[in-house]
Amino acid sequence: MTGGGTTLARESDFRRVVMQSERYLTSDQLNSLILLADKNASGLIDFEEFANRLSGAAPVPGPFAPPGGAASAPGGPVQGAPPPAEEEVRAVGSRCAAVLERHGLAPERLSPLLALFGGDLPADVAAAHLAVLPIGMSRLEAMAQLQTLGSVNGFAAQLAELNAQSVWRTYCEWASTAISGPKLRDVLKDQLIEAEIRTLDPSEFSQALTDAGVAAANIPQAMWLAEKTAQGDVCVSEFLANFGGPPPAGKKKRGLFDRIMGR
């Protein structure tokens, strides 16, 4: 479909066309393309840049634009916080590794993905690019990972190691005892309309955890396990999917016979 001079396509259509035209493309490579594809607010993929870049029409194609267009382009240097503790680096890294696995993308694909945006990217620019990829990591978190691990290659190697050690599973087991999923669902439901499709400022989400009975000493670690937007807001739906326990079963609507029989 087209609109406003931009060619858009549903992800399913984009996948089908790419698979038909590139029959030897692996599933991992296709997932990489989907991650890089520029999308609008409705999730439609803008393949105009891909057509221009990959058709060979340009004699010397330059780096890809940042995912999401100019609005998400890296700005100035990320204003960093004090260096994170080693435990925070491991927790955030294990979370990102789990998100990559959910997308079917191997950690070693991160370096080739970022290379499409140019070689030898400064750390703050590389962090901004990582943050706009759908791996649930904020710019500050990405910058902390790169500062601690030295490079995107170092970050990718760390993710692969954390995956091999099943570190994310260990954190999930910790969360099952430290966080009452049903209580957190109730708190969010009481405080927010359509809470499960919202994002929350970290301070708001931290307060929700407190209201759900999470011990103060466990709040920082719980926050490390929360997927975030590039700006640092917490993705509520993903957190509840991981740590909120089973969603409440929908109440079955009684039929006429059941009402007559008082059931």
Image (cartoon, rainbow, N blue to C red):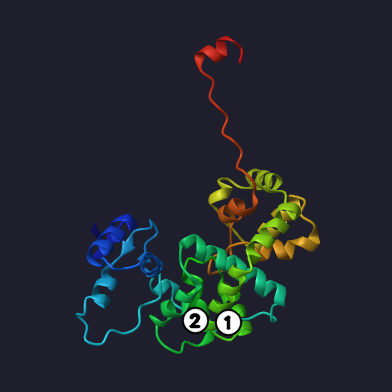
- Amino acid type at circle 1 is Leu
Residue visible at 56% across and 63% down in the picture:
98
- In whole angstroms, how far apart are the C-alphas of marks 1 and 2? 8 Å
Q: Is residue 165 left or right of residue 197?
A: right
What element does badge 2 sit on? helix
Quick check: 119 left or right of 147? left
Q: Determine whether the residue tagged by mark 1 lies in a helix, strand or loop.
A: helix
> How many C-alpha atoms fall within 10 Å of the one at disc 2: few (<14), some, or many (≥20)?
many
- Residue found at the very far left of the displayed protein: 57
Quadrant containing the C terminus in the rendered view: top right
Label annotation for residue 126 = 2
**Residue 154 percent coordinates (x, y):** 56, 82
Task: Identify the residue position indicated by label 1 in the image.
Answer: 146
Residue under the image location 22 percent in, 76 percent down: 55
In this view of the protein, can residue 203 be seen by the observer? no
Residue 88 locus on image (x, y percent): 69, 72
